[in-house]
Amino acid sequence: MVAYLLGSIPSAVWIGRHYFGIDIREHGSKNAGATNMLRVLGLRAALPVFVIDFLKGFIAVTLMALLRFDAALSPMWIINLKIIAVAPVVLGHIFPIFASFRGGKGVSTLIGAITGIQPHLALMCFAVWVVIFIFTHYVSLASIAAGCAFPVFVSIFSVINYLRHGDTSIAFILFSIAVAVLLIWTHRANIARLRKGEENKTYIWEKSE
């Protein structure tokens, strides 16, 4: 419940209304997320939204890390417990109780959660995102690519961990697959626009023509 309420903090909606006098869900892609804030209101509005949404996921899983002081729990079980916190915080972001259940796509919150679970894997996924974005300027395509790369990186990490320590988390592998599926599902409209060549490009430092 705490994770869901944390995820339900609608940063894009509140910042849009309080500082810019608009409901971001009525503009652009009508998505309450950092990308739409960037397109509609610029970097000054998008940056705090991304930071807040990132922290929602990070804090939700980090709270579970307090259980590491229980000697009966192995590092893999701590990861499993962190994964349990991811679903409600992301669902809260997508379906926020504080914003009529109309939220964002959960990418920033997922990034924060993954960073709280395994920072190096989050960094690897972010590297994929940056490369795809630089070459295409499609945030949606970059997010999908990074999400699909996540289970690949997790599988490699799990094999290495098993060979080194004889222990791994099947739940983490299943979670990574679920993340990829979720990102594809939440970006289904973007995928349709990409196939038609109608998806909007995003430029951080300059406006698209």
Image (cartoon, rainbow, N blue to C red):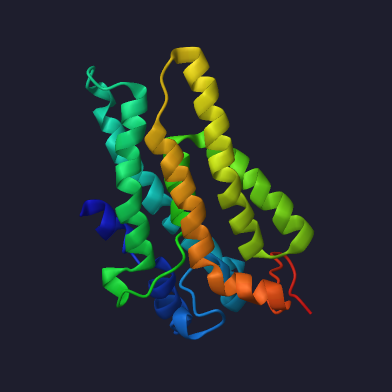
Q: Is residue 200 visible?
A: no
- Give how far across and how far down residue 186 sits, in percent: 49, 66
Asked if residue 47 lies left or right of residue 75, the reply is: right
Name above or below for residue 11 compared with residue 78: below
Which residue is drawn at the image coordinates 26% and 31% (left, top)? Answer: 66
Residue 108 visible, this angle = yes
Residue 55 in the image: above or below residue 198 = above
Query: What x and y, as percent, mark residue 7?
Result: 33, 58
User: In the figure, is residue 197 to the left or right of 96?
Assistant: right
Q: Which quarter shows the C terminus?
A: bottom right
Residue at image location 20% in from the left, 54% down from the top: 1
Most foreground residue, 52 or 151: 151
Q: Hey, which quadrant is residue 170 in on the image?
A: top left
Image position of 55 (left or right of 184): left
**Residue 93 spot, x, y in % from top left:** 37, 63
Quadrant position of residue 127 = top right
Residue 175 position within the rendered picture, expressed as x and y whole percent measured from the top left = 42, 44
